[in-house]
Image (spheres, rainbow, N blue to C red):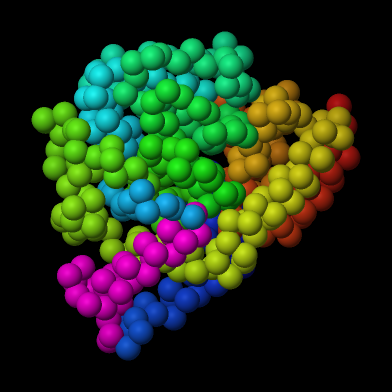
């Protein structure tokens, strides 16, 4: 039992900024003089429309989304988008290219196979997804309707440090690094992200889509997954996840107060730097990813001894550094250090790791 907040290194759902939680708590019964909570409002009411419009406008401003692109809020998480992307976009040629650099990009490709011909343009599974392919390694087709990649591999702890180029629209899953650095939105036909890693409570995906790509969906595409419908109805074809959108708005205001994506980028460099510097000098812990491919959001590491890994995860948890166990498919440890993780939390974790190392000499 903890009487205070812990440092939560969960990969998602994950930490939210304390000022956001406090503001939500303060408004939980009466939002802005409406006499009700944001979660009790009709999504067609003026009070709610204001929340919605402000959230969307802030999102556009913070990520510098150009007018060519629309912002959508959709249900079904990032996994829903694995299907939506294929159903909406593959029709142009019936084919798509996928880079498989981890678990989720593999699942995205597998889902897309139901709707067209999928060509694997890169696959790092032979290296256990410890690296990211360079642009010249991508075997891109000339007739793909789109090229899909996952910008940050949440489970393996690798991250693309460049925007891949392709002769077709580029589609990115940014679930675990959106809002942590500036993004070349215009260089993407579509970007999507489940919000529960770096933006809001679980329950929806944010989609940024080049409007010229909408309207080509396969005829059996469910209306609720049609980008054209969602654009035409401003994400309100049916009842949207109203409280999630409200929470996203609070997080975006917090991000803005911290200096926007530039502020977030400085913090992510600081957090990741602290942890990787320690790993590079440790005799007990080793980073899993290749140096050039290291994620600044999900830091994966291990001791090489599964029992010692388990002991570390358990002792860390008892000190308030929780959810440090690696994903069940890879084992080891993973520290997810998203926007809401204070630098102080990483500093204290590193101190604890040094202490653990001293006490567990190999
Ligand atoms: C978590 C995650 C997903 C799955 O998200 P859901 O919202 O649970 O569907 C997909 N892609 C990436 C990169 C993720 O980190």
Q: Establish if 139 lies above or below 354.
A: above
Looking at the rendering, the stretch of residues picked out in magenta corresponds to 34-63
Q: Which residue is drawn at 24% across and 33% down?
A: 88
Q: From what the image shows, is residue 309 above or below residue 73?
A: above
By secondary structure, the bulk of the magenta-drawn segment is best described as: helix
Q: Does the magenta stretch include residue 61?
A: yes
In the figure, is residue 204 to the left or right of 197?
Answer: left
| Residue 205 image position (x, y, % from top left) | 35, 48
Q: Quadrant of the N terminus?
A: bottom right
Q: Residue 29's image quarter? A: bottom left
As rendered, which of 115 and 326 lies closer to the eye? 115
Residue 309, how many percent across, how many down? 69, 32
> Where residue 311 sits in the image (x, y, percent)?
69, 37
Residue at the left extreme, as displayed: 219
Measuring from the top left, give residue 89's x and y in whole percent. 27, 30
Q: Residue at x 62, y 48 (%)?
A: 337
Q: Is residue 23 above or below residue 133?
A: below
Q: Is residue 140 visible?
A: yes
Left or right of 222 in this view: 209: right
Foreground: 253 or 137?
Answer: 137
Quarter of the picture holding the C terminus = top right
> Residue at the spot x=26%, y=71% of the render?
49
Q: In which quarter of the image is residue 259?
A: bottom right
- Lateral position of residue 326 relative to residue 197, left or right: right
Quadrant in which residue 237 is drawn: bottom left
Task: Examine the rendering and report whether any part of residue 14 can be seen.
Answer: no
Which residue is painted at 57% across and 11% down in the image? 126
């Amino acid at each position: 039992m903890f009487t205070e907040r812990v440092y939560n290194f969960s990969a998602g759902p994950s930490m939210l900024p304390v000022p956001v939680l406090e503001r939500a708590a303060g408004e939980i019964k009466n939002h802005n003089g409406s006499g009700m909570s944001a979660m009790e409002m009709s999504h067609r009411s003026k009070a709610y429309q204001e929340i919605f419009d402000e959230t969307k406008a802030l999102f556009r401003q913070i990520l510098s989304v150009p007018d060519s692109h629309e912002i959508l809020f959709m249900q079904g998480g990032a996994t829903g988008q694995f299907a939506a992307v294929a159903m909406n976009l593959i029709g142009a040629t019936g084919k798509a290219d996928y880079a498989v650099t981890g678990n989720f990009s593999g699942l995205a490709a597998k889902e897309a196979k139901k709707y067209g011909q999928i060509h694997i343009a890169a696959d790092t599974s032979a290296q256990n997804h410890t690296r990211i392919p360079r642009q010249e390694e991508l075997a891109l087709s000339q007739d793909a309707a789109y090229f899909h990649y996952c910008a940050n591999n949440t489970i393996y702890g690798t991250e693309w440090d460049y925007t891949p180029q392709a002769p077709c629209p580029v589609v990115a899953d940014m679930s675990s690094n959106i809002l942590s650095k500036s993004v070349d939105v215009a260089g993407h036909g579509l970007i999507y992200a489940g919000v529960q890693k770096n933006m809001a409570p679980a329950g929806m995906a944010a989609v940024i889509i080049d409007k010229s790509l909408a309207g080509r969906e396969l005829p059996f595409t469910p209306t609720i997954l049609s980008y054209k419908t969602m654009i035409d109805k401003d994400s309100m074809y049916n009842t949207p996840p109203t409280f999630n959108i409200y929470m996203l708005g609070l997080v975006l205001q917090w991000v803005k107060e911290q200096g926007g994506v530039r502020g977030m980028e400085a913090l992510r460099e600081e957090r990741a730097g602290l942890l990787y510097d320690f790993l590079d000098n440790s005799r007990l812990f080793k980073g899993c990813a290749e140096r050039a491919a290291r994620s600044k959001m999900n830091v994966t590491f291990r001791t090489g001894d599964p029992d010692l890994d388990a002991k570390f995860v358990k002792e860390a948890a008892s000190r308030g550094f929780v959810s440090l166990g690696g994903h069940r498919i890879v084992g080891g440890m993973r520290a997810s250090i998203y926007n809401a993780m204070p630098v102080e939390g990483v500093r204290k974790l590193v101190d604890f790791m040094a202490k653990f190392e001293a006490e567990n000499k190999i």
